[in-house]
Amino acid sequence: MAHVGTDVHKAKEFLEQGEVIGLPTETVYGLAGNALNPEAVLKIFRVKNRPSFDPLIVHTDSIAKAETFVKHIPEKARQLGERFWPGPLTILLPKKTIIPDLVSSGLETVAIRIPNHPLALQLLSVLDFPLAAPSANPFGYISPTTARHVADQLGHQIPYVLDGGSAQVGIESTIIGFTDGGPIVYRLGGMALEKLEAVVGKVAVRSHSTSNPKAPGMLSSHYAPRKPLLLKKPAEILATYKPERIGVLSFEELTHLIPAENQQILSVTGDISEAAKNLFAALRALDTLDIDVIITELVPETGLGRAINDRLRRAAFK
Ligand code: TXA
Ligand code: MG
């Protein structure tokens, strides 16, 4: 069973031995291993039960180090990195061969991010390799935002979870890439589109692409609880289920139609960032109740609200 603790040097030792560990970041917890060691990377895929066609994000702690993993950084990408790193932004860049093909699932680009978390940055600064880390959840399930979430789900398969408290952003990083046609967001996330556009101008969003996704964060059924999640109002569902069998995830307010203990409120003050921070823990809490169905509503489609709605739509039962 994994130890949970705050010992950066213990974390470093495990990683140097080719082990994978739970890593705190400001977005969600990662399942981290040496990105330059194909065996450690393979272990990540195995522990997470993740298909190998789904590439990983490489975490580092400086743009100078990132330059040793990528062939070049386009001007707009550099502007974004300088402005928003460390932070909840992942940039796709043309990879050098030092990054194993397994990390990028054979793609020409590698996803790079500098996370904004003091323990993660401290750990990265004492390692002489970057960390490949997907979110530390079993493939398809809700991402973890506490060390306890990681230990509960993957603890039997990993030796250590570095405990950095509750993730402050609460939703995965925004993924952006650069083509001749300009910047494209492939996954809406913790860095609001408006902030990116303020630096690089108009950004296209392709995160709703479907059939054979290049970035499986784009898979439509993802981030899902085990119980069916429906985008419905209480009145619409009460014909089918008893009130005590219904869980509610709502943005600001309780409903009097459902028992209060079955309800999770994302932000009583209607604050979108607070809602993002609470989203995954609230979904997990509802998923553990003895109920048959979870209902939810979309939040205002602005700022981080876009990313929250993206996750809710993907998690919703089809
Ligand atoms: O906030 C985050 O990004 C967290 C923390 C741990 O950093 N990590 C995370 O990783 O969410 P993961 O593996 O759950 O999601 C990474 C996404 C996947 O959807 C993957 O397909 C996409 O990034 N991705 C990685 N490399 C890519 C590439 N070269 N081209 C397109 N998509 C890529
Ligand atoms: Mg994930």
Image: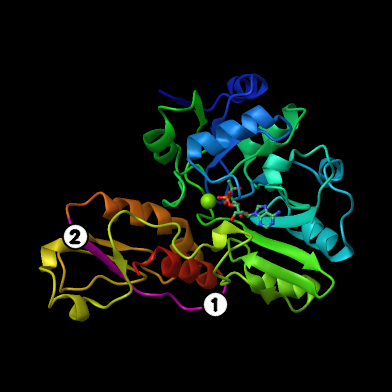
Give the answer, above or below, for where 120 lies relative to 173.
Answer: above
Q: Mark 2 points at which residue?
A: 292
Note whether residue 29 is visible: yes
Q: How crowded is mark 1: few (under 14 residues within 10 Å), some or many (20 or more)?
A: some
Residue name at image x 40 percent, y 63 percent: 315
Give the answer, above or below, for where 83 lies relative to 318.
Answer: above
74 horizontally vs 116: left or right: right
Q: Can you tell which mark lies on residue 125?
A: none
First of labels 1, 2 by sequence position: 2
Is 150 contained in the magenta span? no
Is 296 contained in the magenta span? yes
Q: Looking at the image, which is closer to me, 220 or 306?
A: 220
Residue name at image x 51 percent, y 64 percent: 273
Q: Looking at the image, which is closer to me, 238 or 249?
A: 238
Helix, strand or loop at mark 1: loop
Q: In which quarter of the image is residue 33?
A: top right
Residue name at image x 65 percent, y 71 percent: 193
Label 1 CB sits under 8 Å from any ligand 1 atom: no
Give the answer, above or below, for where 275 lies relative to 140.
Answer: below
Picture quarter with the N terminus: top left
Magenta-tinted stretch: 291-303
Q: How far apart are marks 1 and 2 (CA)?
A: 31 Å
Q: Name the residue under label 1.
A: 302
Amino acid type at circle 1 is: Thr
